[in-house]
Amino acid sequence: MSHRSFVRMAALGAAAATALFAAPAAFAAAPAGTAAPLQISSALAHQESHGLHALSHRGSNTTVSSSNWSGYAATGNSGAFTSVSSSWVQPTLTCTSKTTYSSYWVGLDGYNNSALEQTGTEADCIGGQAEYGAWWEVLPASESAYSVTVKAGDSLSASVVDNGNGTFTMKLTDSTEGWSKTTTANGSSGYQDSSAEVIAEATEVNGSIANLSNFGTVNFSGAEADGNSLSSYSPNEIVMTGGSDTKAQPGSISGGSFSVTWKNYS
C-alpha cells in the first residue's frame, strides 16, 4: 500500500470514529418539551380543600359571585340530584415567580350546604414551574391525591354518583394518559344532594384561598346532572371575584358546554 493510500484510509477511519462517538450525544438529547411535568404530592394535597366561599348575588337571581368558585351550579331541594358529570381539557398554565393554585372538578352538594363530594384535577405554579395532579374529596376532609400523571392538554372526564346507601362513587378518567380512577366513600355528614356543579376554582390552601393560577381558558363539555344537560336546570352562573376585580369569568352555557376564563390572580 502506498503512503498516500494509507494516509487517506487513516483519515476516513478517524472521521468515522468521530461520527460514531458523536451520534449517541445527538440521540440522547430529548426534544424540548417532552419531559413529564411535575405532579402534586400527597403532602401538598392534604393542605388543600374546595368548599365554597363568600357567595353573594350580583343583581340577578341566577348570577352570583364567589371568592373561589367559577362555573355553573344547578340547585334544588334536598334529593334533587343524584349524579353529575362533565369533561374538560386540562389547561396550560402561564407561570411566573408567583405561587398560584387552581382546580377543575365536578361535585354534588356544596352550594347550599357545607357538604361536598367531588373529584377533579389541579394545576399549580410552584417555584415558577407548573405542577399538575388529580384528586377526590369529601368535605370536611382535605383532598386525596391520585398517583397518576396529568399533563396540560389532556382530555379528562369526571362523575360523582350518589349510590343511595350513604356512599358516593367518584370517577376520574384521563383518556390521553390512559388511566381511570374510581373511589367510593361515605358522603359528607348531612349531605343533601341539593346541588350539582361544574367548577374552576382558586384552591383553598391551609385554610386560605390561594392566588389563582393563570390557566387562560378551560373548556367544559358534556356537563350533566342526572343524565340531563346542566343548562336544562337554568343553573346559577358563578363569577369568581376578589374585591372589585373579577378573577375568573364563565362564558354562557349551551347544553352542557361552557368555558371559564382567567382574569386576575386575586
Image: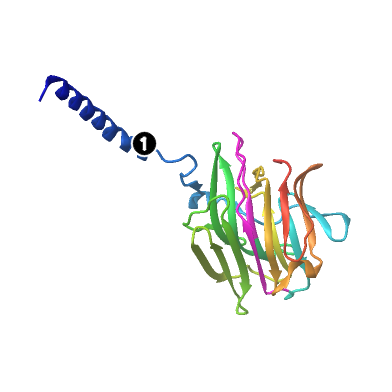
Q: Residue 184's quadrant in the figure?
A: bottom right
> Which residue bears the numbered disc 1?
26
Quadrant in which the N terminus appears: top left
Task: Give the farthest residue toward the left.
Answer: 1
Considering depth in this image, is 137 or 228 the residue closer to the camera? 228
Relative height, residue 87 to residue 34 (above, below): below
Query: Which of the 4 image quadrants contains residue 7?
Result: top left
Give the magenta part as a residue range: 81-105
* Neighbour tally class for label 1: few under 14, some 14-19, many 20 plus, Cα within 10 Å: few
The residue type indicated by label 1 comes to: Ala
Query: Whole-percent x and y of residue 82?
Result: 68, 74
Frontmost residue, 177 versus 85: 177
Give the x, y percent position of residue 203.
64, 50
Q: Quadrant of residue 238?
A: bottom right
Q: Quadrant of the C terminus?
A: top right
In terms of secondary structure, what is the magenta stretch mainly? loop
Name the residue located 49 percent from the left edge and 61 percent from the top edge. Answer: 178
Q: Is residue 83 left or right of residue 59?
A: left
